[in-house]
Amino acid sequence: MLRTIFVRQADGSGLVIDVRPEARIKPEGRLVFDATAELCATVGWDYRRLGDLPGVARAHRHWVAGYRHPRCRNQETARAALKHLVAEGPCSIRSLSCFLGAPVLVLPTIFHLMWCQEIVADLDSHRLHLDSRVWAGGTP
């Protein structure tokens, strides 16, 4: 399935992203990607094409996506989590959840914040678990 996404970046610039697994790209598809890149350049937008994510990275994103709905976010817990991470720096999901309260009650908010990228973890190179380090959005 091809997905084309338009993103308005923080600096106001535009970015078009085409997403399609490598195995599903036919020669005529490559021509469409090239034409899209040229069109984006004419209006001053950036263009990127993304292929497959490695299995672990894909699985992590699917897991976190399960918490994308706003009902997973408790605003009081979210504020406390972000305040703690800003003040204390990176910590494990386990220690953050224990600091915030009963893990069963606060983990949905932590995962929702990860979906929103307000809390960040390395989802590409490390297996996600309770001892994974997280930090407030941005670099650790």
Image (cartoon, rainbow, N blue to C red):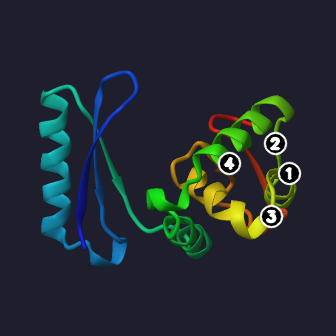
- Residue 90 x/y as whole percent: 81, 42
Label count reads 4
Q: Earlier in the sequence, mark 4 or mark 2?
A: 4
Q: Secondary structure at mark 1?
A: helix
Q: CA distance from mark 1 to mark 4?
A: 10 Å
Q: Which residue is mark 3?
A: 102
Q: Residues within 10 Å of mark 2 (few under 14, many from 20)?
A: many
Q: Is residue 119 left or right of residue 94?
A: left
Amino acid type at circle 1 is Phe
Q: Which residue is mark 2?
A: 90
Q: CA distance from mark 2 to mark 3?
A: 20 Å
Work out whether 11 lies above or below 46. above
Q: Secondary structure at mark 2?
A: loop
Q: Residues within 10 Å of mark 1 (few under 14, many from 20)?
A: some
Q: Earlier in the sequence, mark 1 or mark 4?
A: 4
Work out whether 18 lies above or below 11. below
Q: CA distance from mark 2 to mark 1?
A: 13 Å
Q: Are marks 2 and 1 in contact (CB under 8 Å)?
A: no
Between residues 17 and 130, which one lies in front from this camera angle? 130
Q: Residues within 10 Å of mark 4 (few under 14, many from 20)?
A: some
- Residue 27 x/y as whole percent: 18, 69
Numbered badge on residue 77: 4
Q: Secondary structure at mark 4?
A: helix
Work out whether 117 lies above or below 23. above
Numbered badge on residue 99: 1
- Residue 28 x/y as whole percent: 12, 67
Amino acid type at circle 3 is Ala
- Residue at 34% of width from left, 78% of height from top? 23
In the displayed image of the protein, which residue is found farthest to the front?
A: 76
Q: Earlier in the sequence, mark 3 or mark 4?
A: 4
